Each structure stands twice: as structure tokens, then as C-alpha cells.
Image (spheres, helix red, strand yellow):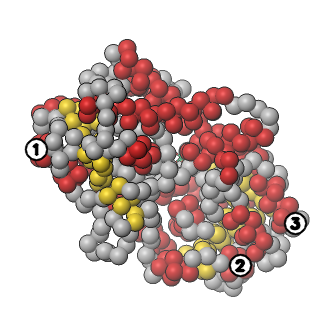
Amino acid sequence: MFTRRVAVVGTGYVGLTTGACLASLGHQVVCADIDTAKVERLRRGVVDIVEPGLAELVGEQVSAGRLSFVVGAAAAVADHTDGLDAEIVFLCLPTPMGVGGVADLRAVEAVVEETRELLAAGTVVVNKSTVPVGTAGRTAELLDRADVAVVSNPEFLREGSAVHDFLNPDRIVVGCDTAEAAERVAALYARLGAPTVLTDAASAELMKYAANCFLAMKLSYVNAMAELCERVGADIGDVTDGIGYDRRIGQAFLSPGPGWGGSCLPKDTHALLQVADAADFEFRLLRATIDTNTRQRQRIVDKVRAAVTGRRTGSLARVRLGLLGLTFKAGTDDLRDSPALAIAALLRQAGADLVGYDPALVPDPANPDKVAPGIVDGEVEGVPLVSDPVEAAQGAEALVVLTEWPVFRTLDWATMAGVMKQPVVVDTRNLLDPATLRRAGLTGIGLGRREA
Ligand code: UGA
């Protein structure tokens, strides 16, 4: 197997996973970040991101001499550990949602500016971040180097299983207008044996949005279907089970919830709407997907209101509620665009008195100074955090499960019920076993469930 010299710019969850996994495939990788303190920590093997297997892989690859860390993109592309320039440069940079849902490309542009004169002839620059269609072309223009190819190679990693997803991909997508450069990038992954789609850059860029927006649409559809189930006395679990056996639909991504969130799906759905608007295409299906998701949050608040007060219009003023789970999904400490926080904000607006428990946000006694991003003075967006689920239940008129942490299934629900003011659990993830709750003396209310 051949080894390539690879530079990865940006050590977020995509960049660090890409760097460590490419090193594990035998390549020689240098990862760069502008955050000097972070680079120092990474050199010592300290990984800040909660991502299963990542810290171990980073440690292993650093020890094996295949992975190193430097400050700044310039050092990564031109000052490789073995004194040779990088052959392939991955850009794994943030592309946050800017004004009006347009992706903000300033980080990508800054790195291009910083490195354009340093790249060796024949280097391939690969964009891994989710970027608007046309970015590869724009990057090539900014680079203005006929001897450097720009390739789009979107990532399809989920937070919480990024290492697994990288090493077990459903497919590799490589888009470039030069076949030779695309093949060089595809060859980096040859050992994974995944189906590879070689295409032009614009199609590769669009493919990423097409995938994420389809997933968002699937979830909005399921959440709407759960609501319909409640109205007609059907059960969403049985319905999704049944449709999931149809191979054209599949079982995955069919769990109703408080709405989809995180750093990708909300950003990408808005960005694709922008792309459609700019192309003078009214993408109604996508707009409805987003609207359904926004409405889902209000629907959860209405459910809580009805559960607590027994009335659709009852007041939540000064009602104490315990929120179980605040991260956007289980297996991560990421709070970005978390539906749980959006719902918490609506509940607070309605006057509720909130307290939150999340297993990923409990202070670590071994590392008391480490605070997850988003926590300020023991609060997340105004929701005080407690470090024990029973504390969240104390005096609560209802508990609201917002993140599907498996540990919630096996909580001591009888003890929880014992300290609550009113034994009600609104389970927005249909995570808990209704019979277990009943035995503990609790009324469980799920989404689209027959019992609801
Ligand atoms: C998503 C995609 O799944 C990845 O393929 C993609 O690479 C990534 O975005 C990205 O663009 O980088 P991620 O944001 O980590 O990954 O989260 P998902 O696992 O997709 O979950 C998104 C949201 O949907 C979460 O709020 C989750 O709770 C919700 N969800 C997911 C449900 O409500 N029900 C489900 O059945 C599945």
C-alpha cells in the first residue's frame, strides 16, 4: 500500500477524525489548528471532543509517528514532519450559518489566502467541510494555481460515531473536474473497500446537502406521522416498524423526537434553501421540512402543558419542570442547535421554572476545571444544571425527556416518582418503557403512542 503525505487544516470533530483515521490507514498526517493551546493539548494526547475511540486513536497514531500537530495551516502544508510538503491538503473548517442562512466561508477563505503561495506544484486541496455548491470552483479561483487541483470530498460522519463512520463508510464521494486528482483522493481510502462515487465538484457538494436534507425530511415526516397517530389512535412505533421493513425506506432515522437539531441538519437545510432561492427554485418540500421541525418544538411545549395542567390552555407559570437531556442527541456533549434548548426556552417563556440534568454535562471530579462549551456558571442558556437525575425530579410537576440517553431507561424511576410533586413524565424520544413507568407509579406520555 502506498502512503501519502497529508495535511489536515482544522481539528474539530471532522478534522481530527479525518487526520487520526487517515493516519490509521497508513498515511503520514499533520493536523493544523489556529488554537495554540489546543495544539499543545493534542500533542499531549488530550482530546477535548467527546467522540468514542477518537482519543485512543489519536494517542496510538501519535505514538506510531504517523500523526502530528502544528499551529497554523502554513506550517502543515509546507513544513511536514519529514521535511517534505503535503501532497494532499484537507480543509476541515467551520462553515457556520451566516446571515439569512448563507454558509459563512471566511475560515476557508482565510486558509486559502494563507497557503496559496506555499503549496507544492501538484498538491490536491480537498474540501471536506459542507460548503455551498460552487465552493470548489471559488476556492480554485482564489488559489489561482493551475498546478493545484481542488476536490470536494464531503464527510458523512455523525457526531458520537465519527470514527466508526469514517472507517466503515456507506460510500466515499469525490468530486473534481480533473479525474486524476479525484482518483488520488479516492485512493487514500482504498483500504476501506467502500463504494466510491467519482463525480464533478458541484455534484459532490450538492450530494452532501441532498443527504442531510433528505434525512431531515425523513424525520419531519416521522414527527408529523406521530402527531397523526395520536389523532387517529394509531401507534408510531408499530407504523415505523412496519414501513421500515420496506427496503426502499429502511429502519434507520425513523424515531420521532423533539425535532432534529445539531450543528449540521439545521444549518444545511437552511443553506440548501438559499441555494434553491438563488437558483430561482421554490423548494417547497424543504421549506415544509423546516417548518414542521419548528412547529415540533411548540407541539412538545403544548404536550407538557396538557400533561401538567390537564388543559390545553393551562398555565405553566412557576411550574417546576425537570429536563432530562439537553444535548442535541445522545453520545455527545454538543449543545449547538439542540432542540432540547429550544424547547427549554419556550417553556421558560411560558413561565416554567426549569432545572436540567444531562449525563454529558455533569462535572468530572477527575477534571473539575473542564467545562463543556455552552455552560456558564452552572447553567445552560438559563437552565440551571444538576448533577443527579433525582435532583432534577425533586419537587417537579413533570419530567421531560429530551435526549435519548440510554441510561435514562434504567433510572430508579420509583425513587424519582417519590420525590416529584406530580408523577408525570413526558418522553419526547419514546425512550422509556411505559410499563416500567407505570409500575413506578408514573404517568408516561410519549409521542404518537397508543397510550398517549
Ligand atoms: C448528521 C448526519 O447524520 C451525518 O451523516 C452528517 O455527516 C452530519 O450531520 C454532518 O453534516 O456533518 P449529526 O449532526 O451528528 O449527523 O446528527 P444525526 O445523528 O444525524 O442527528 C441529527 C438530529 O436528528 C439529532 O437532533 C437527532 O436527535 C435527530 N434524530 C435522529 C431523531 O430525532 N430521530 C432519529 O431517528 C435520528
- Residue matched to label 2: 74
Q: Is residue 178 left or right of residue 410?
A: right
Q: How crowded is mark 3: few (under 14 residues within 10 Å), some or many (20 or more)?
A: few
Q: Position of residue 317 (x, y in %)?
A: 31, 41
Residue 418 lies in what quarter of the image? Answer: top left
N-term mark: 3 or 1 = 3
Distance from label 2 to label 1 (Cα)?
A: 60 Å
Disc 3 vs disc 1: which is toward the camera? 1
- Along the line of sight, the residue nearer the viewer: 258 or 435: 258
Q: Quadrant of the C terminus?
A: top left
- Residue matched to label 1: 418
Q: Residues within 10 Å of mark 1 (few under 14, many from 20)?
A: some
Residue 366 lies in what quarter of the image? Answer: bottom left
Q: Of the residues shown, which amino acid type is indicated by label 2?
A: Ala
- Residue matched to label 3: 144
Q: Quadrant of the N terminus?
A: bottom right
- Along the line of sight, the residue nearer the viewer: 179 or 204: 204
N-term mark: 2 or 1 = 2
